[in-house]
Amino acid sequence: MKAYQTHFDVAMAFFIRNKMLGLTITLNTLSWAGLIMRDQYTKTQRIIVRVYGWLVFLYLFVAATYVQIADLIDIWGDLDLMAETSLLLFMELAVISKILTLIFKYDKIMEIINGTEDILCSENRLEGQKIIARFLGEHSSTFFIRAKYPFNELKSPGYEFALIHQCMMMVFTGYFEFNINIFFASVVAGCRCRLKLVALSLRNICINIPVNKKNLITPEEEKLITERLHCAISQHKYALDAAEDVKHCLSEVLLVQLTVSIVIICTTAYQMAVNKSTDTIQKLSMAGYLLGASFEVFLFCFQGQSLSNASEDIADAVYECPWYTLTQPLKRTLLIIMMRAQSPAILTAGGFVTLDITEYMAIMKASYSFFTVLQQVSE
């Protein structure tokens, strides 16, 4: 029994656990792919895992991008075939940008995750646990994909190699795309949850403190409220710092994602409009690409909108507390917090496009505009 328990403990030591289920799944998935390092790895193991991760990255993504660029050059001038190849090419570029962001900004992202994990695990208030619970519950080709390989892919063994490569590329691209999107969305959701907990602390700043006949607090009560307020201010500052770090870490990759999504949406819509094929599977595949790209944009725009709303709710939480019973110094402090909340935390793409629901509608309109231009050029 002891031996069994020892093996179980060893196995669990290599399983990354997080308060947020989405991060638990994606952290383990990405670590198995060599993109995330585990704390218990030795220096030698880290080198091996890093080499393994780069080999996976080069084979599945860089090689896929190369063969699609080669095919794009080969068919240059044929708008129909170029649109088909560009669809997968830009999707690969989006995945590559996210993986590179994860690799080069890993330390900062993990610092944000660990900070959020500490806050969520230390929360013991009933309402705070309810807030956490809500957040824990958010031209035709021989092959599947047009590509030009540097060998004759129609003859053995080139055919078998290309076929295996494309099968693995399709499976792992979708797999990594899903996990990395959930990973980044969970990081943003963690910041939102921390801001919600700050709002709860401010809303309950006078909890368990009775009001006397004059509707004013006593000096002892003022001291207790001051301590609670200082704690809430510190939590607010750290939550805003984490949100700012998230914005800086994801800004470039979100710009790539938005640009790529616009290209994918308009080229997919163009393919569906000009393709007269009666193949139901092909039509469903193209519709799936269109919906997937649209949902991907919506996911980050929704997270950006929710993050801004959570930071702005701090001002409402301050107003909902019994501020009228407090002394003038405490009222001034609360007023400063409300003023700070007027500048909400945001997600940006490249530092100049704010991600929210309004921006999502603008992106969809831009995609449709590009689609109509592409259709007119074709005609």
Image (cartoon, rainbow, N blue to C red):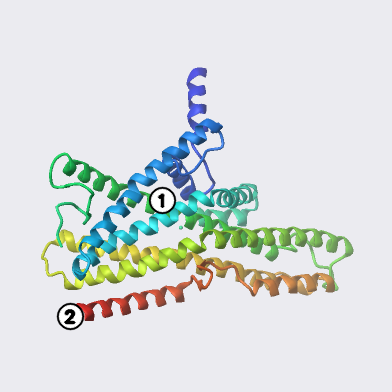
Which residue sits at x=84%, y=71%?
Answer: 329
In this view, the mark in front (1 or 2) = 2
Residue 283 in view in this figure: yes
Disc 1/disc 2 C-alpha distance (Å)? 40 Å
* Horizontal arrangement in the rendering, residue 80 relative to residue 201 (left or right): left
Q: Is residue 2 above or below residue 189?
A: above
Q: Nearer the viewer, residue 268 or 131?
A: 268
Please, what secondary structure does the residue beneath circle 1 have? helix
Which residue sits at x=81%, y=62%?
Answer: 226
Point out residue 334 in the picture as x, y percentages from the top left corner. 75, 71
Give the residue type that dot 1 points to.
Asn
* Horizontal arrangement in the rendering, residue 40 relative to residue 200 (left or right): left
Please, what secondary structure does the residue beneath circle 2 have? loop
Q: Where does label 2 land, which residue?
A: 379
Point out residue 201 in the picture as x, y percentages from the top left corner. 68, 61
Q: Nearer the viewer, residue 253 or 309?
A: 253
Between discs 1 and 2, the one toward the N terminus: 1
* Horizontal arrangement in the rendering, residue 339 relative to residue 149 (left or right): right
Point out residue 252 in the picture as x, y percentages from the top left corner. 49, 63
Q: Where does label 1 land, which residue?
A: 179
Give the residue type that dot 2 points to.
Glu
Q: Which mark is residue 198?
A: none
